[in-house]
Image (spheres, grey):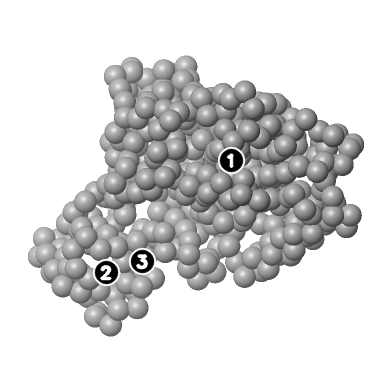
């Protein structure tokens, strides 16, 4: 009989959060992490420029979830950070999401005043309107504005990010980028917008520091844990495992791609050292055609730190890729690609998982859905609490 009650594949938000809750309730937990670090894609560290670099792209904690904040605050103090994004539009840098300030900076004063008033009269102040809904409005001025925003802010960025036309992408994805009828230039409007005082990695270190948690780095869980839908069993290191196996990776890999590979998008970062400060905000988007700017955005991590003052800076130029497990670039799955076909393929894998007692899928990749950091924290806490009731 195994000395572990729970085995978890992955030490990111989903796996680490669930592990802590379970461990505090007396469960012996083993985490198998194939990377050489914890924290998943939120992993960060101080680089040669004394900048806290996010290895897998910018991670910004924002939420209105009291449950997520209370849980994570046990393992970190915070410093305030409100993220602002600018977009390169017709040679200017204007606020993103596109808002009333953006209108003022793009259009002539008389036209800008008219467009602002029409939006306010139609939707009200401090509202967010999905671009696709804006395009359906009967007012010709709103439709004209919507077409401008669609072409210059939304269309090409989305095509570069996802590799599909806007119409081919699930509305749940496209709806995440609204037009903001407001002068609030913050990228998020959540009540809690802060960053871990010492970084995300130290937060995870404290989360996993428990006598009932063992972490093995550089270990692919699927080299040690085997799942058989046919037999309805889990084996660990050659012996039948009658405990709980929580899997946070891509589900098609879990079953040896027996039903085909699911589509994911990946990213590759051209990380550069620059002198001084490179850009005015943490992130600048480039919603231009691929032939103009093949990348989607540039992140300057120094803006996200509690103290800036360093003579050099670190930037990451972000390029989207189709995920390929054997690719030189684009070999990390970041986002599930939501189409009717991919959802059906995923559900077929879920049917296999349901045949295996003790197997649970948790997290963005395993559940094939988008989670922000606060959402997966809350989800993992609730998941572990429900598991303890069984």
> Which residue is at a point 47% across and 58% down the rendered structure image?
158
Q: Examine the rendering and report whether any part of residue 74 can be seen.
A: yes
Residue 130 bears which disc, if any? 3
**Inter-mark Cα distance, 1 to 3:** 34 Å
- Quadrant placement of the N terminus: top right
Residue 167, given in percent of the width and then of the height, sits at 50, 71
Earlier sequence position, callout 1 versus callout 3: 1
Residue 145 bears which disc, if any? 2
User: Toward which corner of the image does residue 8 lie, by quadrant?
Assistant: top right
Q: Are marks 1 and 3 in contact (CB under 8 Å)?
A: no
Residue 132 bears which disc, if any? none
Earlier sequence position, callout 2 versus callout 3: 3
Earlier sequence position, callout 1 versus callout 2: 1
Residue 371, given in percent of the width and then of the height, sits at 51, 51
> Which residue is at a point 40% across and 54% down the rendered structure image?
287
In depth, the one of 210 and 199 nearer the eye is 210
Q: Which residue is mark 1?
A: 18
Farthest residue in the left direction? Answer: 110
Callout 3 secondary element: strand
Residue 302 in the image: above or below residue 353: above
**Inter-mark Cα distance, 1 to 2:** 46 Å
Q: Nearer the viewer, mark 1 or mark 2?
A: 1
């Amino acid at each position: 009989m195994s000395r572990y009650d729970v085995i978890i594949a992955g030490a990111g938000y989903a796996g680490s959060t669930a592990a802590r809750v379970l461990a505090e309730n007396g469960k012996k937990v083993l985490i198998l992490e194939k990377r050489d670090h914890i924290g998943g894609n939120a992993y960060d560290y101080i680089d040669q420029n004394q900048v806290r670099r996010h290895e897998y792209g910018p991670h910004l904690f924002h939420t209105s979830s009291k449950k997520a904040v209370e849980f994570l605050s046990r393992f970190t103090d915070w410093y305030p950070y409100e993220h602002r994004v600018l977009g390169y539009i017709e040679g200017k840098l204007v606020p993103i999401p596109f808002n009333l300030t953006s209108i003022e900076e793009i259009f002539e004063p008389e036209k800008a005043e008219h467009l602002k008033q029409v939006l306010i009269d139609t939707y009200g102040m401090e509202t967010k309107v999905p671009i696709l809904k804006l395009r359906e409005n009967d007012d010709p001025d709103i439709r004209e504005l919507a077409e401008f925003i669609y072409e210059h802010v939304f269309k090409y960025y989305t095509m570069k990010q996802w590799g599909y036309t806007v119409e081919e992408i699930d509305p749940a994805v496209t709806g995440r980028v609204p037009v903001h009828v407001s002068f609030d230039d913050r990228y998020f409007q959540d009540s809690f917008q802060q960053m871990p005082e010492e970084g995300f990695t130290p937060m995870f270190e404290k989360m996993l520091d428990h006598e009932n948690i063992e972490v093995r780095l550089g270990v692919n869980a699927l080299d040690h844990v085997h799942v058989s839908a046919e037999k309805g069993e889990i084996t660990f290191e050659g012996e039948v495992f009658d405990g709980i196996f929580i899997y946070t990776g891509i589900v098609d890999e879990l079953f040896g791609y027996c039903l085909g590979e699911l589509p994911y998008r990946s990213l590759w970062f051209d990380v550069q050292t620059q002198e001084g400060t490179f850009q005015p905000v943490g992130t600048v988007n480039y919603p231009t055609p691929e032939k103009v700017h093949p990348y989607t955005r540039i992140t300057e991590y120094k803006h996200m730190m509690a103290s800036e003052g360093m003579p050099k800076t670190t930037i990451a130029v972000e390029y989207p890729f189709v995920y390929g497990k054997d690719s030189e670039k684009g070999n990390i799955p970041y986002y599930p690609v939501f189409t009717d076909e991919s959802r059906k393929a995923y559900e077929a894998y879920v049917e296999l998982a349901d045949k295996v007692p003790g197997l649970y899928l948790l997290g963005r990749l395993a559940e094939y859905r988008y989670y922000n950091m606060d959402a997966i924290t809350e989800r993992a806490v609730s998941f572990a609490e429900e598991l303890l009731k069984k």
